[in-house]
Image (cartoon, rainbow, N blue to C red):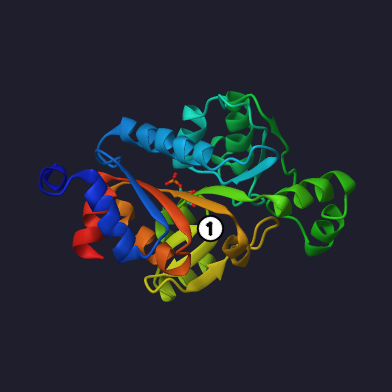
Amino acid sequence: EVMGEILGISEVARELERKLGVRQVVIVPGDSDETFWVQRDIGRAAVTQLKARLAPDDNIIAVTGGTTMASVAAMMSPDKKERPMHFVPARGGLGETLELQANTVCSRMADRAHADYHLLHIPDEVSQETFERMVEEPSIKNVLEMIRAARIVVHGIGEAETMAKRRHASPEHLRMIERHDAVAEAFGYYFNAEGEIVHRVKTVGIQLEELDDMDTVIAVAGGKSKAQAIAAYAKHTPNIILVTDEGAATELLTRY
Ligand code: G3H
C-alpha cells in the first residue's frame, strides 16, 4: 500500500489521532473491504488493546454485535495473567440475526476467554407495558446492573444505511435516516456527518451519554467504505481507542 511506503503505519496512526482527536488509533495493514482476513487482524488487535487495559480484579466488559465484533470474539483467548473478565452485552436487541447479536458475540467471547458471561433476554419488539414489566424481572434487572457497572466497552461502527437495512428497519425509520443524512451507526444510535445524533433505537443497556464515563471504549471498524462513518462517530465520541485498518485510515486521512 502506498501509505505504508510513505509514512509507516504508526506515523499514520499518530496523524489520525490528531486529525480525529481520539484517544488512540491502532491500524492493521490491508483493507477489510477487500480482504477477508484483515477483519480478523482487527479482531486480534482489539483483543490486545483490551488485555492491555484490564484491571487486576473485576473487569466487566460490555460488547456489541456485528461481523467485526464477531471477529474480535473469534480472536479472543484466555488472559495469561488470569485477571477475571466478565462479559455482558452492551445493549438489548437491535434487530440483527442471531449470529450477529450482541448476546451471541458476548457468549463466544467469554467462551474463548474462559470467562463468565451474562446475557440479556429481552425480545426486540414488545409493548411498552411488557417492556416495563420485563426490566423489573430480577434476572434481567441483575444483568442490567452489571451492564451499568461495566468499565470497558468494545463496539463496532457501521454505515447508517447498511445497518438500517441489515436490521430490517421500518420504512419510516429508513426515511428518517435519509432525511437527516445519517452516515454512521453505533450502539443503535445514528449520526450525521457532524457527529450529531439523528436517531436512536430504543432499547435497554448502555446509553450513549454513559460512554463519557467509561474507563475504556474500544471502537472496532475497518474498510475504506466505513471511513465516513468512523469520522462522524469520532466527532461525537472522541474518548475512543479506534482499532481500524489501512483501508479506512488512508481514506480518513485523505478525504475526511
Ligand atoms: O454498530 C455497528 C455494526 O454493528 C457494525 O457491524 O461490524 O458487521 O460492520 P459490522
Q: Is residue 106 above or below residue 14?
A: above
Q: Nearer the viewer, residue 160 or 23?
A: 23
Q: Residue drawn 52% across and 36% down? A: 51
The answer to which image quadrant residue 81 occupies is top right
The residue that disc 1 covers is: 169
| Residue 63 point in image, percent of width and height | 58, 44
Q: Counting other residues with Cα less than 10 Å from the Cα at mark 1, is it few (<14), some (14-19), or many (20 or more)?
A: some
In the image, 250: left or right of 196?
left
Which of the 4 image quarters holds residue 148? bottom right
Horizontally, residue 178 falls left or right of residue 113, namely left
Q: Picture coordinates of residue 232 (x, y %)?
A: 39, 66
Amino acid type at image mark 1? Ala
Q: Note whether 105 is above or below 82 in the view shown.
A: below
Residue 166, percent from left and from top = 47, 49
Which quadrant would the N terminus be assigned to in this image?
top left
- Any part of residue 183 in sight: no
Residue 150 position in % (x across, y down): 67, 49
Residue 2 visible somewhere in the drawing: yes
Q: Nearer the viewer, residue 241 or 178?
A: 241
